[in-house]
Image (spheres, rainbow, N blue to C red):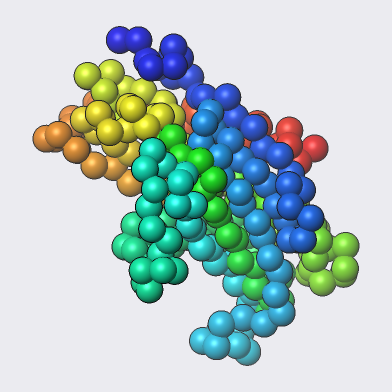
Amino acid sequence: MARPDGREADQLRPVTLTRNWSIHPEGSVLVEFGNTRVLCTASVTEGVPRWRKGSGLGWVTAEYAMLPRATNTRGDRESVKGKVGGRTHEISRLIGRSLRACIDLKALGENSVVLDCDVLQADGGTRTAAITGAYVALHDAVGWLAERKALAGKIEKVMHRSIQAVSVGIIEGEPRLDLMYLEDVAAEVDMNVVCTGDGDFVEVQGTGEDGVFRRDQLDSLLDLAVAGCADLAAAQQKALA
């Protein structure tokens, strides 16, 4: 089956990571997966949440949001609604969990890094693009701490692995990598996979949207995801070079 944008089943969309996109944060990256564009900023603040005070450990957390017209139709701002939606809360927690898997929190001291991931334009895979871009923004924020002698250790030891994420799914029986919106809404199986640069898994979120899926299909999807994440890891390293 031909994909809407003509890609092969195992091919990522064009990926771009633009560092220092914003002048104010300690780290900022505009990440683009095809037409999906997410601005990831990393802000360093003194102190940690109350429950972590006195531990000597730092903290990394994330907030995810989507501009009202990032999608085909306008959505109300959650600030106007007066509450954060369940999907937004879930994605924010996913990004935070994923990025905490790559950093030595003790080396931060009692400092926090907040990762804000704002979707400027959505065409599928917003959470996976956010994770991939947030890693680079976090890396730059850690570098900012190191420049100010506020980091206990070398950057490569503190950021001891890379983190990236990609979507995979089955459309009309075919496993595909990095789903755009038209594929995402038609997927029989939809999955988001967070990997390390070494190919280990941080998190796997998978759902049979239209029935069930077999073990061999799961294996095929995970193989696609690991290969895609390896390409994303290479893109991250190129951006950071």
When the figure is inspected, residue 108 is found, relative to residue 125, above or below; the finding is below
Nearer the observer, 207 or 222: 207
When the figure is inspected, residue 53 is found, relative to residue 174, above or below; the finding is below
Please provide percent x and percent y for residue 51.
51, 86
Q: Quadrant of residue 16?
A: top right
Please provide percent x and percent y for residue 172.
22, 19
- Image check: 142 left or right of 185? right
- Image check: 99 left or right of 79? right
Nearer the observer, 184 or 165: 184
Q: Quadrant of residue 149?
A: bottom right
Nearer the observer, 164 or 66: 66
Q: Residue at x 53, y 28 (%)?
A: 34
When the figure is inspected, residue 205 is found, relative to residue 239, above or below; the finding is below
Q: Residue at x 19, y 38 (%)?
A: 209
Please provide percent x and percent y for residue 165.
49, 41
Which image quadrant: the N terminus? top left
Instruction: State whether residue 160 appears in this view.
Output: no
Please provide percent x and percent y for residue 182.
33, 27
Q: Residue at x 38, y 58 (%)?
A: 76
